[in-house]
Amino acid sequence: MAAYVNDLTMDAAITYVMLRGTRINICTTAPTTYAEATSTYMLAQSGTALTSTDFTLAPGAVDGRKCTIPATSALSVAVTGTSAFVAVTGSSGSTLLLYAPCTTQALVTGNTVSTTAFDWTIRDVTT
């Protein structure tokens, strides 16, 4: 039996993140809350707010839809530690929107760190 989800449904979820994602946070551990992403586990945070035009919505590499989260440069390291995750947070509503693992790297307070762009993909439904 076949299964189907319209791309507009997946786009709505991705657009939710695009419209609300305002910060990139580098974290030591996978955050489960906004407070963890922006304080408890945060090593660095983007100084310039992201806007919806910084994200890219496109077809997925295999199927479904994807959102490309932009690369960021020269994020000021606020806390010394080892990076393990990149999180996207929203300033309105204090929301943790998503996180993904990143290359581990020792970060030192006062230095800067950059991130590469990464994709978040919603795959087509299967049965």
Image (cartoon, rainbow, N blue to C red):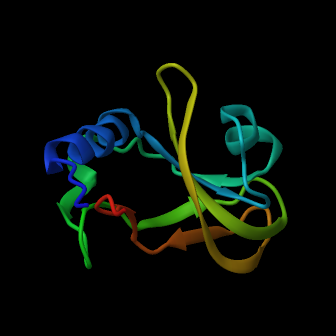
Give residue 80's quadrant in the image. Answer: bottom right
| Horizontal side, residue 78 vs residue 74: left or right | right
Q: Position of residue 29 (x, y in %)?
A: 79, 58
| Horizontal side, residue 74 vs residue 9: left or right | right
Task: Say if 83 sits above or below 21 in the image.
Answer: below
Q: Residue at x 20, y 53 (%)?
A: 4
Q: Position of residue 118 (x, y in %)?
A: 41, 70
Query: Foreground residue, 6 or 48?
Result: 6
Q: Position of residue 31 (x, y in %)?
A: 72, 48
| Horizontal side, residue 48 vs residue 84: left or right | left
Q: Residue at x 62, y 68 (%)?
A: 112
Q: Position of residue 81 (x, y in %)?
A: 84, 66
Residue 69 appearing in the image: no
Q: Residue at x 68, y 44 (%)?
A: 37
Quarter of the image for the C terminus: give it: bottom left
Q: Residue furthest top?
A: 93
